[in-house]
Amino acid sequence: MSLSLEGIGAVLQSDNDQVKIVRLVPAGPAAKTKQVAPADKIVGVAQGDGEMVDVIGWRLDEVVKKIRGPKGSVVRLEVIPASNAPNDQTSKIVTITREAVKLEEQAAKKSVLELKQDGHTYKIGIIELPAFYQDFKAMRAGDAEYKSTTRDVKKLLGELKKDNVDGVVIDLRNNGGGSLQEAQELTSLFIDSGPTVLIRSADGRLAVLEDQNPTGAFYRGPLAVLVNRLSASASEIFAGAMQDYHRALIIGGQTFGKGTVQNLEPLNHGELKVTMAKFYRVSGQSTQHQGVLPDIDYPSIIDTKEIGESALPEAMPWDTIRAAIKPTSDPFKPFLAQLKARHDARSAKDAEFVYIRDRLALTQKLMSEKTVSLNEEERRAKHTAIENQQLALENTRRKAKGEEPLKELKKEDEDAIPAEPDDSKPEDDAYLSETGRILLDYLSLNASVAKH
């Protein structure tokens, strides 16, 4: 949650029986040596002056454990350079002093999405939030520049205000949560005052966490929150508060449903995780099991029956308690039917949405099959037929976008990590673009009613 770790600053991945460097963190310890590069293979690890340990055939996480270590300590790596000739397995030893490595790619970042609609060009601010983080150590030490989700988002909102954006989308897709305090404080940027989350302990006591910001909402403009099945815990607390206060349109997929609080109790051997409490939204609804249900649904390639809190055995149920706020009029409710209709009309023609729905239908069809042939020839024919269907779907999508069709599906490593950070534009993301358009639809419909 502090967005830092102590190690060498290299992203690694498995490559058959070896570990390959995918990329180096800029200005990190490994990059500073100028002796290692992407695609180099690590075949041995030693601590300080200790014995070199052969790590060929090891699991990736076990190799990472040996390479990570406290700041100031030394690790030696036996590396086969990618610049070697194809059959040259000559290695070299690289000595690296571990340092604190900043994980900047996990910090909040902004972009501006430009959309043409109804003959006008609009700007939608996008804030991508991969986690709810806070550098507790730096904060306690009095560091005025400590990293925090709320501080970063507030700064980005200020920049978007200067850009004169017409609305903002908070992108919480795949955000697995993090600091509860940050979820609470982030909520305070968008509401004037009031409770943010309720916590009921196992003995029935109820704690109400309140917005502590005396200055009121920092951003009062149009807002949408984009979520999916992998938005969990702190993400659900924030999204639920935005929905309960009718402060934002919640768009995307049903969230994970992680609404419980655990403590780790030490044992003689290991630790025991004990559920101590449960989270509730200010409307009194639990985030447990059910998660947050969006106002407008997007198709999902993630099967909610297989992934999510509700898919876990003995998961605690969804329930409700007394609401902490009084019901207020919902400005979105009168327009939801029209917003959904406009979204459906657009997505029916959008190449990405069509592809996702067709791919999901194919996946569900394959998952429903309960038998498999033991005849090798039939199995191979079935596999080829499935690949051909997937290729046809991909090429239909590419054709609609004006891209060259593929002759065959790319074989991708399931453990692969992109060699470079993603630099795609928000316009390339169908879900982001459509979320921006839904927000613009709401502004248009609301303005039309206001005129009358």
Image (cartoon, grey):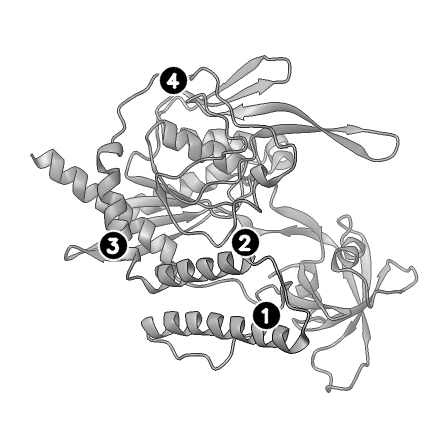
Residue at 92% over, 59% down: 50
Residue at 54% over, 16% down: 207
Residue at which label 4 appears: 325
Residue at which label 1 appears: 412
Residue at which label 3 appears: 345
Give the distance between the C-alpha atoms of the residues marked 4 and 1, in whole angstroms: 49 Å
User: Left or right of 125: which side holds 185?
Assistant: right
Residue at 55% over, 14% down: 206
- Residue 105, position as x, y percentages in the image: 54, 53
The quadrant the C terminus occupies is top left
- Who comes first in sequence, dot 2 or dot 4? 2
145 to 95, vertically: above or below: above
Residue at 40% over, 20% down: 194
Q: Nearer the viewer, residue 71 or 87?
A: 87
SS assignment at label 1:
loop
Q: Mark 3 or mark 2, which is nearer to you?
A: 3
Q: Mark 1 or mark 3, which is nearer to you?
A: 3
The image quadrant that residue 78 belongs to is bottom right
SS assignment at label 3:
helix
- Residue 203, position as x, y percentages in the image: 64, 13
Q: Mark 2 and 4 residues: CB-CB less than 8 Å, in contact?
A: no
- Who comes first in sequence, dot 3 or dot 2? 2
